[in-house]
Amino acid sequence: MNSSTALIAGIFLVVGAAIGYFAKRAWTNKAQQELEEKVKKEVAAAETKAKEILIDAKEKAATLLVELKNDDKDRRKEIEALEARVLHREETLDKKLTDLATDETRLRAREDQLKERDSRVAEREGEVEKKLETVGGLSAAEAKEEILRRVREDRAQDLAQTIQKIDRENRDEIEKRAGDIITTALQRYARGHVAEMTTTLFHLGDEDMKGKIIGREGRNIRALERATGVEFIIDEAPDGIIISSFDPFRREIARMALEKLMKDGRIQPAKIEEKVEEAKEELVKRTQEIGDAAAQDLGIFDLPKELLQLIGRLHFRTSYGQNVLVHSTEMAYIAEMMARELGLNADVAKRGALLHDIGKAIDHEVEGTHVDLGMKLLKKYNIDERVIVAMQSHHDDYPYASPEAYVVTAADVLSAARPGARRGTLENYVKRLADLEKIAGEFPGVKSAYAIAAGRELRVFVIPEKVDDFRALELAREIANRIQSELKYPGEIKVNVIREMRAVEYAR
């Protein structure tokens, strides 16, 4: 039983294995067939795609070939057209060259004809001149001179009368027109004029304050004079001190410093130097305000602040006794009105008049005429070139390059020529004092120099490290000799060389 069962089981096992083998083989064949069909389909699809690509490439190649052929045709047409134009131009040039050669031949023939004609005319003129000399007994030059003389004699009187008539009519018309313009300008502008003098009176309010200002052994008054460069006259005015200097700027610094010292109450050399420096700083701000106010009154609002400060400094400068800022603003009003009457550029004339003396704000400090210095300043701050041209000719240093330049010069003359506007002696006096300080300042070792006592004394402060006591004596004599040889002045001038040694140290 067991053996038969095992046999049957073996048979079934063998049959199952056979069935499994054949089934697997059948499945494998089927899968292989399906794979082959799939590969065939893909190969067919790839061949179809390749054929499509090939067809598309052939079509594009055909299109590109057609385009290239068309481009080649167009290019050939352009080349043919260009060749035709070049050929036409060559033919035209050949024709022009032929015409030019013909014209040249014709001109040469004409030139030969003219030369031949000139020769015949010259021969004819020679024959005529000989005949005239034979008949009249005069040479050709003498005959011409005689004819001109007779014409001049016949027409000289008529010509002179005509010229006089024209000149008289023009002069009368010009003078009438100029008179109307000047009268209108002066009538529309009128203002008072106050000339700055060379002294300033400072009221103390208390006679006892003079002693404090003088100080022990005069040390305070000496410190004040040394720091400000002015002279203080103590005893000539009751309850007051006279500040004397030819420079109004220095006088104003001294006055402001005194005012500050009076308010502070402590008057001693160190405090004096401090207050003088404060006064200088405040005066710089004040000059800015004065310049701003002057420009705004004239309706000028675009000037640089540096120029406005220099305009303010003109308030402390006089020319022949006339305040330069008052003179400049007066000129600006007159020039503007005259320019409007004449139909010129009123703004250029007004600005040129206001800025015509701007160089005087620094001509004590820099070499050169105030006209040249003014031109340099205006160019430095990019002022309109028309304004520079208008102001540069007011002393005839430069040619008049614009109508506004004539207007500025006329306004300058009108403002300066008013009765009482200027005093020549004061200007000469101020110039002499400035020359005194300039001479002393040119010597090596000089720190500062101030002309005081109406020019009768020159105080020279030297650098002690560079000038010893013996050199100070020599320096005083050299400055005096230089003044004698270069300046003209009444009386005598005292040269006072001051050498002061200071030792400063700080306790910390």
Image (tube, rainbow, N blue to C red):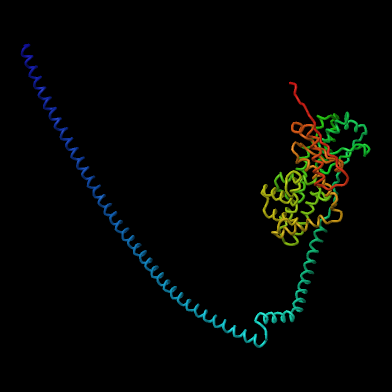
- The quadrant holding residue 42 is top left
- The quadrant holding residue 457 is top right
Q: Answer whether residue 95 is visible to the viewer in this image.
A: yes
* Residue 351 in the image, given as x and y percentages of width and height: 73, 53
Question: Is 333 in front, or is 48?
Answer: 333
Labels in figure, total: 0
Q: Answer whether residue 199 is visible to the viewer in this image.
A: no
In the rendered image, which quarter contains the N terminus? top left
* Residue 420 in the image, given as x and y percentages of width and height: 87, 54
- Taking 452 as reference, is 328 above or below it? below
309 sits to left or right of 240 = left
In the rendered image, which quarter contains the C terminus? top right
Question: Is 374 in front, or is 134?
Answer: 134
- Taking 24 as reference, is 422 above or below it? below
In the image, what residue occupies the spot 13% across and 32% down?
A: 29
Outermost residue toward the bottom in this view: 135
Question: Is 385 in front, or is 263?
Answer: 385
- The quadrant holding residue 480 is top right
315 sits to left or right of 382 = right
* Residue 98 in the image, given as x and y percentages of width and height: 41, 73
